Image (cartoon, rainbow, N blue to C red):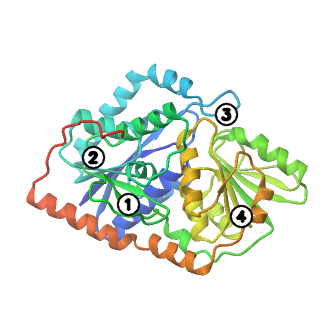
Amino acid sequence: MKFLFIVQGEGRGHMTQAIAFSSLLEKSGHELVAVILGKSKRRAVPEFFEREIKAPIHLVESPNFETDGNQKKVSILKTILKNSVKLKTFHQSLTSIQQIVKAENPDVILNFYDLLGGLYNFIFRPKTLFWVIGHQYLIEHPCFKFVPNRPLEKFLFQFNTALTSLGADERFALSFLPQIHYANQKVRVVPPLLRSEVKVFEPKTGDFYLAYMVNPGYAEEVFNFAKANPQLKVKAYWDQKEAAETELPLPNLSFHRVHDRKFLQDMADCKGLVCTAGFESVCEAKYLGKPVMMIPVAGQYEQACNALDAEVSGVGIASDNFDFAKLESLQKKDSMESFQYKNWVDSWPVIFRALTSEALMQKQKNQRTIPQGSLPSLS
């Protein structure tokens, strides 16, 4: 079958998931015909994505979070206002997606949580299977725990997630651990999507902590901690578009532009990972047996939920600041728990064969039901 990806370009997680899924396609004899990447002016497309994706990459302007003046906290009001004035641009992006889909004629469109992907499927109704994948779809599982007492942010998170999956034939919810299956649940729970490179590293405990921040505004916080604790060594990776490849502001602190192989090597060698509360880096660290501490990006409810889910799953701890010393108290996970987690992650090939077999049967029988475009329930 022919697959086409639509990938959100905010952070590195969705891009690394796309790389991992493209590897599953290649090993199974399917074809990735094109990748549509949602971009923004404040982020550069990482070199590793262009190198690893073996398909043409088409860049389109896509909605993104807006931060405050310190490039740290997500501003919901600013995000809504700035994206609202770009509706004409986003309409052009949707038209571009339609042209690419018509030219490539894929059997499956797989959306990695890009808002335009769901809107495209709802408006243009392509005659192809439409799948969505991401940790965010786990909110549709009955056992998911939301951060309490933030009703407006919860609604906006649910609403945005619903928009990304409008009319989807399948919703795949990436999960730290297997979940109980309920007959009426609206998602398929699947393991984290980790690239094959993660699995070949031999973990060891070095003399430094590793940090990753999706918003460069957190750099000041990391700098202040390193300055106050010269006995601790920190290697920090960030998505700072104008920064040099490596910067050395302190003897015990270095900042690095995002580089997939160097980052994974440092993760295998570090004492522990401290990061903003995404999903992919946390899963990689757990696979390598590293203690993890997550700092949810201020104002981003989704990351607060990620941190809570990771704590409930026993993956790591949450914090409101980059205090690397907190990792000292974390014990390494026992071997049985690590073995079970690795088995869960490594079960993807079996799951993938079942999914594509179903899709092939549906394609051959030509029995696809056109989705009606109604919004999924937000209950």
Q: CA distance from mark 4 to mark 1?
A: 28 Å
Give the residue at mark 2. Answer: 168
Query: Dot 2: few (<14), some (14–19), or many (≥20) neighbours within 10 Å?
Result: many
The secondary element bearing badge 4 is classed as loop
Choose mark 3 or mark 4, whichever is in front.
Answer: 4
* Callout 1 secondary element: strand
Q: Residues within 10 Å of mark 3 (few under 14, many from 20)?
A: some
- The three-letter code of the residue at mark 1 reads Val
Picture disc at residue 88: none
Residue bearing mark 4: 272
Q: Write down the residue under mark 1.
A: 189
Task: Measure the C-alpha gap from mark 3 to mark 2.
Answer: 34 Å
Q: Position of residue 31 (x, y in %)?
A: 30, 61
Q: Residue at x 47, y 62 (%)?
A: 192
- Which sits in the foreground, 169 or 236? 169
Viewer-proximal residue among 20 and 344: 344
Quarter in which the C terminus is drawn = top left
Residue at 54% from the left image edge and 35% from the top image edge = 150
Q: Are marks 2 and 1 in contact (CB under 8 Å)?
A: no
What amino acid is labelled 2 in the image?
Ala
Nearer the observer, 15 or 339: 339
First reached walking from the N terminus: tag 3 or tag 4: 3
Res. 289 image quadrant:
bottom right
Q: Nearer the viewer, mark 3 or mark 2?
A: 2
User: Which residue occupies 26% across, 57% down?
Assistant: 2
Tag shown at residue 71: 3
Which badge, 4 or 1, comes first in the chain's sequence?
Answer: 1
Q: CA distance from mark 3 to mark 1?
A: 34 Å
